[in-house]
Every structure is written in C-alpha cells, then in structure tokens.
Image (cartoon, helix red, strand yellow):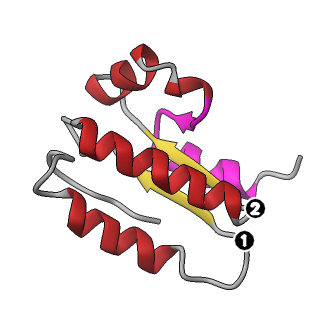
Amino acid sequence: MVQPAGDLDLAATPRLRAHLDRALSTPQPPCLVIDLTKVPFCDSVGLGLLVHTLNRVRDARGRLVLAVSAGMITHLLTITNLDRHFETYDTLRAAQESLTAVS
C-alpha cells in the first residue's frame, strides 16, 4: 500500500514515483492499493504517474486499486474518463478488502 498525502503535483511526483517503484519491485504480480484519500489536488503530472502505474501493474498481470474520497480526484478521473479504467473505492478499508475478496 502506498499512502501519499498533500498535493500530487510536479513537486511531489518524484517522491511518489520512488515509493511506487519500491512497491512494484516484486517478482509476483503486484496487488497494490494507492490511498488517495489525503490528496486534495492532482495535476496532469500526478495523473500521468497514476496512469503509468496502472499500465505497469497491468503489464505485470497485477491489480491496482485506488482509495479515493469524493472530491477533486474523483472529479478528475470522471472528466478524463479514467474512472472507467481505474478500480476505485470510497475508503481505504473497502479498497483493501477488494483485494482479499474471493470472486
């Protein structure tokens, strides 16, 4: 699980990228939760990192789940039609439980 806090912008993206690189450096297909509930703002650079991460996880045959509160991030995913590509949940707990749920 990765839990950024604060704005996800040009200044913060390199730190988040480093955390994501560590989280994805496993030999098994990754199952990753990114908790964005404490991220009030995301610019195009931050959004690009989320899309890049989604592609990396899919290429590795893993699963990426976002915990996203109602607000700017949810709106951003909707207006860019990325809500159709990301698996999102309203709470961190729901996101974590989705990874352990048996289909």
Instruction: Give the percent coordinates (x, y) of residue 41.
Output: 19, 35
Looking at the rendered structure, the kind of residue marked 1 is Pro
Asked if one can make out residue 37 in the rendered structure from this viewpoint, the answer is: no
Establish if 72 lies above or below 48.
Answer: above
**Measured from the top left, where is residue 34 in percent x and y?**
44, 54
Q: Residue at x 49, y 44 (%)?
A: 66
Kindly identify which residue carries mark 1. Answer: 29
Q: Residue at x 17, y 46 (%)?
A: 9
Toward which corner of the image does residue 99 lie, by quadrant?
Answer: bottom right
How packed mark 2 is, by other alpha carbons closer than 10 Å (few <14, some 14-19, many 20 or more), is few
Q: Which mark is residue 61?
A: 2
Q: Nearer the viewer, residue 71 or 18?
A: 18
Nearest the viewer among 85 and 103 is 85
Q: Which residues are the magenta region? A: 85-100
Establish if 45 lies above or below 74: below
Q: Earlier in the sequence, mark 1 or mark 2?
A: 1
User: Is 61 included in the stretch rendered in magenta?
Assistant: no
Q: Closer to the camera, 98 or 44? A: 44
Q: Is residue 11 left or right of residue 42?
A: left
The amino acid beneath tag 2 is: Arg
